[in-house]
Amino acid sequence: MIKAILTDIEGTITRISFVKEVLFPYAAEHLAAFIKTSQDEPQVQLQLNAVREEIAQPDASLDTVIDSLLDWIEADKKITPLKQLQGLIWQSGYQQGDFTGHIYPDAHAYLAAQHQIGTALYVYSSGSVKAQQLLFAHSDFGDIRALFSDYFDTRVGAKQQPQSYHNIVQSIPFEADEVLFLSDVVAELDAAKEAGLHTLQLWRDGQPKSPNHAFITSFEHIKNETPS
């Protein structure tokens, strides 16, 4: 019996283009100025040092750090300090009303209904927990953070590694076979299934499919599919 749902964000409950065409360009455009004006803040300083560690240059200049971050954005790297800094930049954008967090209407309706009947909802995304909470706090449907019991990012491990899902299960009050994982990415679904979770693929934008996972094109169809 499914007692909890763990959901991806990008491509699953929000459109991929929102991240690619709105959030990433916004962060890239504002990153250099943000770092230069905020470099002495402890939370920013921590991430800048993490970048220096990642590139194995402990004495790297601020310009070198900024160039590395911009290169990672261009290459769509899922590196934790980048994600943490992006979240801080997006916070300003959300608060200023430069954009709202896109959520598919069918996804919002499904998650709200599941929350209402007592299903525990969790989020696991390569975007930082801060970025996740910002999106949900400033979503197209208003502040929907109350729907979710907890949030996870790459600090629990890479999304394509089974151990990451073991780590999540160990931190929530459910067994692996009581959790349904939703994602659009086959490799993530494979990892979750190997960890013992049920899986369901959201197939919205022509991503590769796998015979190992049930799939739907809309949450309106979820009753017609049995999770894998």
Image (spheres, rainbow, N blue to C red):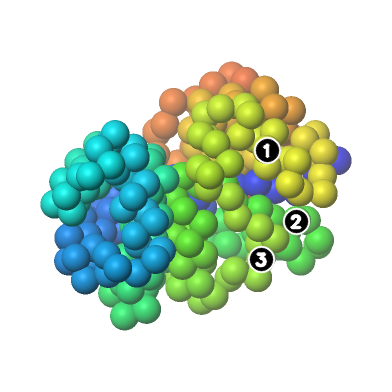
Residue sitting at the far bottom: 96
Report the residue at 81% width, 61% height from top: 118
Q: How crowded is mark 2: few (under 14 residues within 10 Å), some or many (20 or more)?
A: many
Q: Mark 1 points at which residue?
A: 167
Going from N to C along the chain, the mark reached first, 1 or 3, is 3
Is residue 154 in view from this perspective?
yes
Which sits in the foreground, 63 or 191? 63
Indicate the position of residue 217 as horizontal and vertical percent values. 52, 41
In front: label 1 or label 3: 1
Position of the C terminus by quadrant? top right
Task: Look at label 3 and name its amino acid.
Answer: Leu
Report the residue at 59% width, 69% height from top: 145
Whole-Å distance between the Cαs marked 1 and 3?
A: 22 Å
Q: Name the residue under label 2.
A: 120
Q: Name the residue under label 3.
A: 147
Indicate the position of residue 89 as horizontal and vertical percent values. 31, 65
Indicate the position of residue 46 as horizontal and vertical percent values. 39, 56
Which sits in the foreground, 27 or 211? 27
Left/right of residue 180 with respect to residue 123 in the rendered view: right
In front: label 1 or label 2: 1
Q: Is residue 42 above or below residue 196?
A: below
Residue sitting at the far front: 59
